[in-house]
Amino acid sequence: MYIALEGIDLVGKTTQIELLKAKFQEAVFTREPGGTNFGLTIREILLHKDNKLADMTEFLLFLADRSEHYHQIIKPAQKYNKLLISDRSLFSGIAYGLESGKLSQNFIINTNLEVIENMLPNLVIFFEISKSELLNRLNKRSPDKIEKRGIEYALSIQTRLLNLPKELNVQTLVINATDNEMDIHKQIVNAILNKISGI
């Protein structure tokens, strides 16, 4: 069972991942980018290195990370019937790729599907946040390279992320990111248990 937590930065995915680790102790937990040693290097380049990358270069770096992550983490977990919970997935890669407006939608979607051999998540849990709350959270921390692109950029990515799983026929649960932390945790746990039970 492959579960992906999706949403833009600062919506609380990392907090919920930590809570889920206590509940599902036998599960495999990972993240994109950075779920492998190779991915950690890519993550550093993408989010923290002070360099300006061409849109195609950035896209291909995300894609390289996704390919390695699929072969090292996702595919083995599926092979051995493990519960896999990932912080982000191909949907983030597609959304950020589309946002540049420089690459074709067919190219972006098809290459992402190719590197994961069409193995889509069984369930996407999407964290949605309001503009006002996102601004509030952004003001409390130093932004990385992606966050420096601004609030409207982030909200446009959020819209893409909300629609992409539906377009690819993947079941989605939308969570209000401003809800109480433990209420969100309960919603996610119930959704995962229901999915495992086939409900």
Image (cartoon, rainbow, N blue to C red):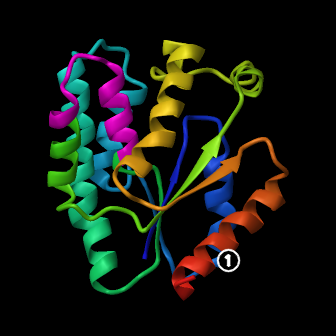
Q: Where residue 183 sits: x, y (%)? A: 82, 60
Question: In what quadrant of the picture does the C terminus appear?
Answer: bottom right
For the residue pair 38 and 185, the one nearer the viewer reads as: 185
Q: Where residue 82 sits: x, y (%)? A: 41, 82
Tell me if 63 is positioned left or right of 88 in this view.
Answer: left
Q: Residue at x 50, y 77 (%)?
A: 27
Tell me if 85 is positioned left or right of 44 in this view.
Answer: right
Q: Where residue 58 sits: x, y (%)? A: 25, 26
Q: Residue at x 46, y 23 (%)?
A: 146
Q: What span is colored magenta in the figure?
A: 91-107
Rendered view: 148 above or below 196:
above
For the residue pair 197 and 151, the one nearer the viewer reads as: 197
Q: Residues within 10 Å of mark 1 (few under 14, many from 20)?
A: few
Q: Which residue in the protein does label 1 denote?
A: 23
Q: Residue at x 21, y 58 (%)?
A: 116
Q: Residue at x 18, y 23 (%)?
A: 56
Classified by dominant secondary structure, the portion drawn in magenta counts as: helix
Tell me if 103 is positioned left or right of 42 in this view.
Answer: left
- On the question of residue 33 being in view, the answer is no
- Amino acid type indicated by mark 1: Lys
For the residue pair 91 and 45, the one nearer the viewer reads as: 91
Q: Where residue 169 sits: x, y (%)? A: 38, 57
